[in-house]
Image (cartoon, grey):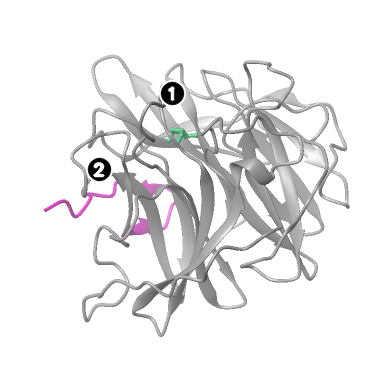
Amino acid sequence: MKRSILLFVTCLISAAAWAQNPLVTHMFTADPTARVFDGKLYVYPSHDVVPPKGFDAPRFCMPDYHIFSLENGATWKDHGRVLDQNEVPWGEKNGYGMWAPDCVKKGDKYYYFFPSKPKDGSSFRRIGVGVSDSPTGPFKWEKNYIKGVNGIDPGVLIDENDAYLYFGGGHELMVCKLKDNMVEVDSTPIKVEGLPGGYKEAAFPLKHNGLYYLTFAHVFADEGYTIGYATADNPFGPFQYRGKIMDNINTGTNHHSIVNYKGDWILFYHYWDLSGFNKLRSMRADYMTFKEDGTIKKVVPTLR
Ligand code: FUB
């Protein structure tokens, strides 16, 4: 994998630290998956671009992935392009379809999951994986996509020694267990039951106080995109819908993740701050609260 020039572009952050929204201003960033590895905060977003001239843009124009880390509690470091669309061994060339990724740590390895269209011309996306010794890569990309899986928005839950992959948009969320090698399914994907009728995409799983949480984008005709959550006593469900984490802020998408960083819960999500256009998005973050009873207090975004 060829790495592009390292960009040490940072954005100035308020004294309160890292959460000056939007988080970075030198490029568009969407679908932010935040992760804390060994006490350090990383974000794995996707990347919206203005469609190249003459290019008949699809719904989103997304050519590659960058990785960001929080430095000194104050600045976001851009580690540069970690994967370009034309470097995906099994992927469609110049498809601009690199949608929401995820990255997890298992053992001492980092696994980067991403959706892309395969070069066989099929209309649905597949999910690929890269493996690295470092959270910022370089990743060694698997030669093929994960067999048996098709869909978007991979979200991975590491639960003790087990890993579960959630994926899928368009009203159906699937889950399967991954093998120890993290690049193959260990069980046939099944549909996650119990989600509300408006389930759309962007599933982000987490475990808190022994309870399994699935957080996701859901769209109701009268409300548009909202972020909601459901809980279960095991990773396969069935889940029980518990309510909303964020109301609609946008006539486009919202896509989020949740981390605990230095004792605070933080919700990462996106909006179109820099562009005013819902296909050129920017990642943001705001604090989130789990109540004593395990429910989540709705987050009010700090929109200016
Ligand atoms: O960014 C492309 C797609 O839009 C994502 O995969 C969805 O979750 C939505 O944010």
Which residue corresponds to the image point at 28% horizontal and 50% vertical from the top-left?
A: 299
Depth check: give the residue in front, 106 or 146. 146
Which residue corresponds to the image point at 73% horizontal and 47% vertical from the top-left?
A: 129
Residue 294 seen anywhere in this rendered image of the structure: no
Q: Is residue 290 magenta?
A: yes
Residue 31 falls in which quadrant of the image? top left
Q: Is residue 187 above or below residue 77?
A: above
Q: Nearer the viewer, mark 1 or mark 2?
A: 1
Q: Is residue 295 above or below residue 104?
A: above
Q: Look at the numbered disc 1 and say if its residue's Cβ is closer than 8 Å to ligand 1.
A: no
Do callouts 1 and 2 mark residues in contact (Cβ within 8 Å)? no
Task: Give the x, y percent position of residue 206.
Answer: 58, 50
Which residue corresponds to the image point at 83% horizontal and 30% vertical from the top-left?
A: 147
For residue 58, the mark is 1
Q: Is residue 298 magenta?
A: yes
Q: The residue under label 1 is which amino acid type? A: Pro
Q: CA distance from mark 1 to mark 2?
A: 18 Å
Residue with the mark numbered 2: 272
In this picture, residue 274 sits left or right of residue 174: left
Earlier sequence position, callout 1 versus callout 2: 1
Q: Secondary structure at mark 1?
A: loop
In this picture, residue 271 sits left or right of residue 296: left
Task: Give the x, y percent position of residue 176.
Answer: 76, 34
Q: Which residues are magenta?
A: 286-304
Residue 156 seen anywhere in this rendered image of the structure: yes
Task: Give the x, y percent position of residue 294.
Answer: 46, 51
Depth check: give the residue in front, 141 or 154. 141
In this picture, residue 186 sits left or right of residue 127: right
Q: Secondary structure at mark 2?
A: loop
In this picture, residue 258 sits left or right of residue 119: left
